Amino acid sequence: MRTRQTSLVLILRHVTSLDVTCCQSLKMATTGHLLRISAALAVFLGLLSTLQTGNCDEQVPLILWTSEGISLPSQSPPAAGHIVEQQQLAAYLEKALNEGPRNVVLFLQDKMSIEDFTMYGGAFGNKQDSVFPNLEGALMSSSSPLVLPAVSWPASNAVIGQLQDQLDTSPLYMDPETLSQLRLNASSPALLVFRLPYGIGADLMSAKEILSGNDEVIGQVLSTMKTQSVPYTAIYTALRPSREAASLSIEAGLGGGRSLLQARSGYKERQRERERQRRIKEKAEIYGPVEFKEGEDTCILMWAQGLTVSILRSGSWEVQDLKPLTFGKDVRPKLDGSRCDKTKARLVLNYENVLRHRDFKLIFVMSQRHYKVSARRWFTLDAVELEYDGTKATFNGSRNIYAPAEYSYRCESVTNYRWPLLTPRSSKDPANQWRVSFEDFQIQGFNVSDGDFSYASDCAGFFSPGIWMGLMTSLLMVLVLTYGLHMIMQLRTMDRFDDPKGPAISVPQTE
C-alpha cells in the first residue's frame, strides 16, 4: 500500500547516488529521503550539495498530476541523477495525455529550481513553514502524480509546443479571474496557460512571498476547475532555473553565516522586475464604468477595481469574483430593474449562476435630500442588497457612505467585514452569511453630466490614524517639556552661603 507523505518535499522522492551528476543526486537525496535519514545527515547533504560545481543550475523540476478521482498508469521516474531531455519529456507527456484528461492546466513559472522546494517547502519537519499548501493538497488528492526533479530547461521551454502538438489545439493564456467565464468540455481538449512570476530580491524572503502568492494562484485555479466538474491534467514547471537567484554558494558561505543565504545581483534584478510589473500595469486595459441611462441621459455610474461576494457554507467561505461579469471591453451587464429620478436611484446588476444560485442580483439603493444643518443636498448609499432565488440580504450603508449631491463617492475599500462601511440590517438578516467587497469603488447616482463622474468625495478623512498618532505624540512631548520647564522655574537658591575665608556657618539644631 502506497504511503502518502505530508510534505511536498517528501513527495519529491527518488533514490539517489553519487555519480557524474553528484550535485543533482544530493539535491534529490535531501528532498526524497527525509523519512529514512536523520535530520543531521539531511542537513549535511543539503550543505554538501551547495559545494558542488558544474551544471547543477541547468535543470528545472516538473510536476504533473490529475484531478481528484482520475487515475493514470504509473510512470517510472528517471534514475537518480538522470536529466530528462526533450525527447524523453515528450514521451512522458504523450503517455499521460493519451490515457488521461486532455484538458491541460499549465502553470508556467518564470524561474524555478529544486532548491525552491528544499528551502521553502517545509523541509526537515517544518510543516508550518511550507509555502506550497495548495500544491501539496493537489498532489495528495491525485492518485498518480509524476515528479521529475531534473528536466533540462531547454526541454521545459518546449513544453507548450509539445502540449500544443499532442492536443492539436492552441494555448490560451489566462488569469484566475477570467477562468470562471470559460466553459470547458471533457470531450474537447484545451490548453490553459497561467504565467507565474518569480522575482529576485536582495532578501530571500521576497522569493518566499512570491512563491507563496503563486501557490495561492494555483489553489484559486484548481478551486475554479473543481466547480466546473471537468477532469483535467495539471503541470507545474518553469522556463529557466532559479539557481542564480536562490543558490547557497560557497563564495557566500566564506563571507560568514548570515551571508550564506544571500542572493547574487539581487538589487538589479529587483529593479528590473519592478520596472516590468510597472509596464504591465500601464499596458493593462482600462475599462469603463457601468452606466445606466434614463432615456438619453446617463443618471447612474458605478466603477470598481474589485467586485467580490462570498457566502459561508459548511464552515468555509466560497468566493465569487463579479468583476469579469460586470466590467470589460465586450461585457454588457444586465441592468433590468434599475431606475432613477431626482430623489431616488436604484442600480440593479443581474447575474446568473453565482455561488450556485441560478438568479443573483446586486442592488445599490441611493437617495438624496436637503439637510438643514449643512444647508445643502447630500446623497447617500442607503443599502446594498443581494437577491438570490427569492431571498434578500440587506446591508445598510447610509451612516458611512455619503457625499454632496453634486459629487460622486469614492473609497479604496467598501466591505462589511474589514473596517466595515456596510452593516447587516439586523442580526437575523441573511446578510450575516455574506461578505461583500468593493475595491477602489466609485459610484454616482445623481447630477451626472456628459457621462463622466463628477468630483469625487473620498471616504478617507483628513485626519488619518497616522496623523492622529503624530498629533497625540507631539502633544505628549509638549506636556512633558512644559512640566520640566515648570519644575526648573520652581527651583529656589539658598539664602545662606558658606564663606571659605570666614568661619563656618553654624545652624543651631533648635531652629
Image (cartoon, rainbow, N blue to C red):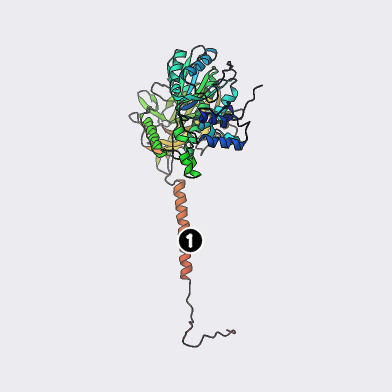
Q: Which residue does the image show at 55% across and 13% down from the upper left?
A: 99
Q: Residue furthest right?
A: 1
Q: Residue furthest top?
A: 187
Where, quadrant-wise, is the N terminus in this rendering? Answer: top right
Quarter assignment of residue 405: top left
Q: Position of residue 483 (x, y in %)?
A: 48, 64
Q: Is residue 329 above or below residue 168?
A: below
Q: Which residue does the image show at 43% across and 43% down from the upper left?
A: 461
Within 10 Å of disc 1 (Cα), the crowding (few <14, some 14-19, many 20+) is: few
> Relative to the observer, which residue lies in front, 419 or 291?
419
User: Which three-letter amino acid code belongs to the residue tagged 1?
Assistant: Val
> Relative to the observer, which residue lies in front, 233 or 382?
233
Q: Position of residue 378 (x, y in %)?
A: 42, 38
> Relative to the observer, which residue lies in front, 211 or 451?
211
Residue 439 visible, this angle? no
Where, quadrant-wise, is the C terminus in this rendering? Answer: bottom right
Q: Position of residue 460 (x, y in %)?
A: 43, 41
Q: Which residue is mark 1?
A: 480
> Relative to the observer, which residue lies in front, 352 or 182?
182
Q: Is residue 373 above or below residue 41?
A: below
Left or right: 354 as drawn, with respect to 298: right
Residue 502 visible, this angle? yes
Q: Which residue does the image show at 53% across and 37% down from the upper left?
A: 47
